[in-house]
Image (cartoon, rainbow, N blue to C red):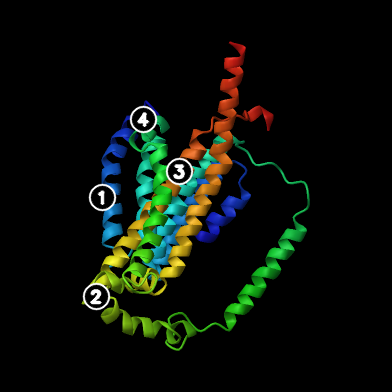
Amino acid sequence: MRHHLILRVVTKLLVGTIILFAFYVQFHGDFSPGGGFQAGVIMAVAFILYGVVFSLRKAQKVFPPWLVHKLVALGVLIYAGTGIVSLFLGYEYLDYGAFSPHHPEHGQHYGILIVELGVGITVTGVMVAVYYAFAARPPRISDEEW
Amino acid sequence: MLVATAIAIVRMQRLFAIAMLSGVFSLLSALLFVVLDAVDVAFTEAAVGAGISTVLVLGTLALTSRVAKHSTHSPAIPLLVVLVTGATLMYGTLDMPNFGSPDAPAQTHVSPDYLERSPHEIGVPNVVTAILASYRGYDTLGETAVVFTAGIGVLLLISGLHRRREDEDEEEESGES
């Protein structure tokens, strides 16, 4: 899409805004609609848009595939690890009260933030990884064969 | 508008237009969710349905063909199945309480309990997030694991094969040289 000047300029403007909005949805999710799943998807959309309008190669330079694959696992680890930390602090699995014994409400707050972060990281990773997997395959079947 | 888009999708042959129209369909249903006050779901529908899945479908189109094949069998049996299923579902909705009715099971079972308890137990204004991440923490962990597994599966299926083929190509090339 080298000659689509308007698309490229608009994309450059939008990508930053989309990422900012993703962070807003992620960390403001306990006050307004949204949460890890939504934020992860919006974040992934930013990278996918960049990859579609510029090129897959450029997108992979910004967000390399090995990092994406690590993030996919990291998110689940953060979520499950939160539960294990609360186990070690003497509470039940995923009982966020453990993070602030005197103010269980604050503990819940921290717990939800961390857990949602884990969800967001995994969802971003999976979406971007699936996009990379699809887009990286060269079209092997020509139209005439169908 | 949803129905019109659906009919257009069914009638069309060009897969590119169908992919774009299914994006439009997702966007319209996201609007429907906003009207029903399910903003969290609308977010997801708009981003996943209208954004990512359209891009993925287009990516798949680039790998395969661009025009739908004509089906050879008659449409009578599928039409009958769809009509019967639709009629059953509509019959089922007759027993449902009206939308927003205060004595619907959805309003009387556990939700008043959650609504009452979450402000002082969790202290998070968005009850959806409170239920999702705290009361139903195990479920969400499971969902995250499902997303994780699905991603790994797609990666193994698609990019794994691709990489192996590349390796084979490289081996062939090195063997030739």
- Residue A101's disc number: 2
For this rendering, which residue is in front, A98 or B47? A98
Evaluate whether label 4 is on the same chain as label 2.
yes
Between the C-alphas of marks 1 and 2, the distance is 33 Å
Query: Sequence order check: which comes first, mark 4 or mark 2?
Result: 4
Q: Which percent across, then down, holds residue B9?
A: 58, 51
Q: In the rendering, which numbered label is found on residue A129?
A: 3
Q: Amino acid at mark 3?
A: Ala
Q: Residues within 10 Å of mark 4 (few under 14, many from 20)?
A: few
Q: Are marks 1 and 3 in contact (CB under 8 Å)?
A: no
Q: Are marks 3 and 2 on the same chain?
A: yes
Earlier-in-chain disc, 1 versus 2: 1
Name the kind of residue labelled 4 in the image.
Answer: His
On what subunit does the disc labeled 2 rest? A
A23 vs A129, left or right, is: left
> Which residue, given by chain and number where applicable, does mark 4 sit on?
A4
Query: Is residue B64 visible in the rendered structure shown here?
Result: yes
The answer to which of marks 3 and 4 sits earlier in the sequence is 4
Residue A112 as seen in the image, left or right of residue B156: left
The residue located at (50%, 39%) in the rendering is A133
Q: Secondary structure at mark 4?
A: loop
Q: Residue furthest bottom?
A: B103
* Most foreground residue, B41 or A79: A79
Residue A19 is situated, as x and y percent measured from the top left of the image, at: 29, 48
Q: Nearer the viewer, residue A68 or B14?
A: A68
Do circles 4 and 1 both sit on a common chain? yes
Label 1 belongs to which residue? A20
B40 vs A70: above or below: below
Question: Is B174 or A54 nearer to us in this picture?
Answer: B174
Q: Residue at x 36, y 31 (%)?
A: A58
Label 3: chain letter: A
Q: Do discs 1 and 3 belong to a common subunit?
A: yes
